[in-house]
Image (cartoon, rainbow, N blue to C red):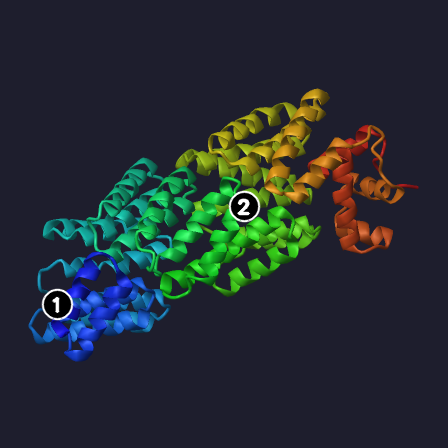
Amino acid sequence: MVDADLSSGRESYAAAEWLDALDQLSRADEAAPLGPADLELLGTAAYMLGRDAAYAACLERAHHGHLAAGDRARAARCAFWIGHNRLFRGDPVQANGWFARAKRVLDEVECVESGYLLIPAWLAAMARGDFEVGYRAAAQAAAIGERFGDADLTWLARDDQGQALLNLGRVEEGRSLVDEAMIVATSGELSPIVTGIVFCNTLSFCQDALELDRARQWTAALTRWCDRQPKMLEHNGLCQVHRAEVLELGGAWSDALAAAQLAADRFTDGVLNQFAAGRARYRQGEVHRLRGDFEAADIAYREASSRGHDPQPGLALLRLAQGDSATAAAAIRRALRETAQRLSRAALIPAFVEIMLAIGDIDDASTAARELDDIAQIQGSTVLWATAACATGMVNLAADDLANALVPLREALRLWLELQAPYQVARMRVLLALTCRGLGDEDTASRELDTARSAFVELGARPDISRVDALRSARPDHGLTRREEQVLRLVAVGESNRQIAATLVISEHTVARHVQNILAKIGAPSRTAASAFAHRHGLAGRDH
């Protein structure tokens, strides 16, 4: 029976039947302690099922077994992977202890394991944004892996070299390495654990670099890999999160919610799944916000934060949609101020521009839009080009520079169409409608609004539907109430919401609501544009 379980366990492992492998190898181990090589198989099966404690326990026994057999290199490798696991479980003290043990065990033995021990160095360097140092450490490890013919080390290192290059602005080189790493991962050349790591790392790199067209293709590959191992848990959570991100971009919001829910509720075991859960809640928050389910969005963002995922910029945009522009502005300013890395800033700047324009700070919005354009020039991804063009168009529109708003907004529309992103396409059409209306082309504005509304209805984007309806029914005589005229007059002389509240003896929240209603009624995208409208229609200055 022992021999049968051991043989069956090895076969199940080779077939990626992880639950069967765990059961069979565990029974064999209970009957007669496994040798270190088979303990490594048992540990890998536990890892793929999200059982981190069992994984580390098996590797620790394998480590001691290899030492007893005199195989210091293999003992050091087990120690490294235990440290790696501890590191990602948020236990750097234990991790450093195991990394130190691995170095001591090697005792300057020339072997491939010395390359694995460079991994903590490059992870630390990249975490602090020092991508030059990270790149050099990864390049050194890749060379060691190649010299010893170790595909796992070689492609772990090359994949992270690709990440470093993307962040350093050496985009074509980075893309090539990342794409090649994914080809290797899909070909079955790597061990199961490293295959999963390369898949998940690469997709995270693509998302962080806003390479969403690549993310779509590689998410499909990761999904196929996970589907071939239905009982695997460790990488399935991140797979579902990446699917949710791709589905959301493509406008399949219900499917995106379902994928994120699956990641957050079902795939909870294992280090990677714990990380994925926070990201999944954030994606849920985004879809709820766009649908107008503000309470559900607030809950999702808070859960994301409690699981270690920053809820910005979504939470700031939620506050803006709720009419609390002051809180939105404070949050997005803080988030951008704390963020130094170029690509991380690029993810925040579109929301920053939108919120700054909403509060009438056109100077800060313009500065941020120029920064985003500079980043797009360096990185060159389609998403960055689209968001940069949109930001430039929005700033020009808010400044009433309509002629210079039209071209970038048309370019943003073209790029979002190319990316098959229906929500972003519809938003561009609304901005184009406002621009055309300002230029006196009401016929084109009407067509763009009708097309945008149809897209928003199909998506279920209720706040956007309401906004379009308000724009379509905007009256030539502006249709403002007496109180709204008072607020608009004070906006036109440059008063803030707080100053207006003090002048009119109403709450700041009420002022914010009036401002949003005014913008909708007169078809203005910002306070600056509303001020220009007020001057054109004799509504500027205090109401005496």
Q: Mark 1 points at which residue?
A: 106
The image shows a total of numbered marks equal to 2
For the point 77% across and 54% down, which residue is it? 508
For the point 10% across and 69% down, which residue is it? 72
Residue 478 vertical placement versus 159 (above, below): above
- The C terminus sits in image quarter: top right
Q: In this view, does 336 lie to the left or right of 125?
A: right
Is residue 8 in view?
Answer: yes
Q: Earlier in the sequence, mark 2 or mark 1?
A: 1
Residue 377 is situated, as x and y percent measured from the top left of the image, at 43, 33
Depth order, front residue of 544/36: 36
Residue 384 vertical placement versus 291 (above, below): above
Of all residues, the one furthest to the right in this rendering is 544
Q: Is mark 2 on a helix, strand or loop?
A: helix
Q: Amino acid under label 2?
A: Trp
- For mark 2, does the 10 Å Cα neighbourhood hold few (<14), some (14 to 19), or many (20 or more) residues? many
Residue 208 is situated, as x and y percent measured from the top left of the image, at 42, 47
Q: Name the residue under label 2.
A: 253
Residue 485 vertical placement versus 331 (above, below): above
Q: Is residue 57 left or right of residue 114?
A: right
Q: Amino acid under label 1?
A: Leu
Quarter-wise, where is residue 538 in the image?
top right
Is residue 77 in view?
Answer: no
Depth order, front residue of 107/440: 440
Tag 2 near tag 1, CB within 8 Å: no
* Residues at marks 2 and 1, CA–CA distance in whole angstroms: 52 Å
Q: Residue 47 carries which label?
A: none
Residue 132 vertical placement versus 418 (above, below): below
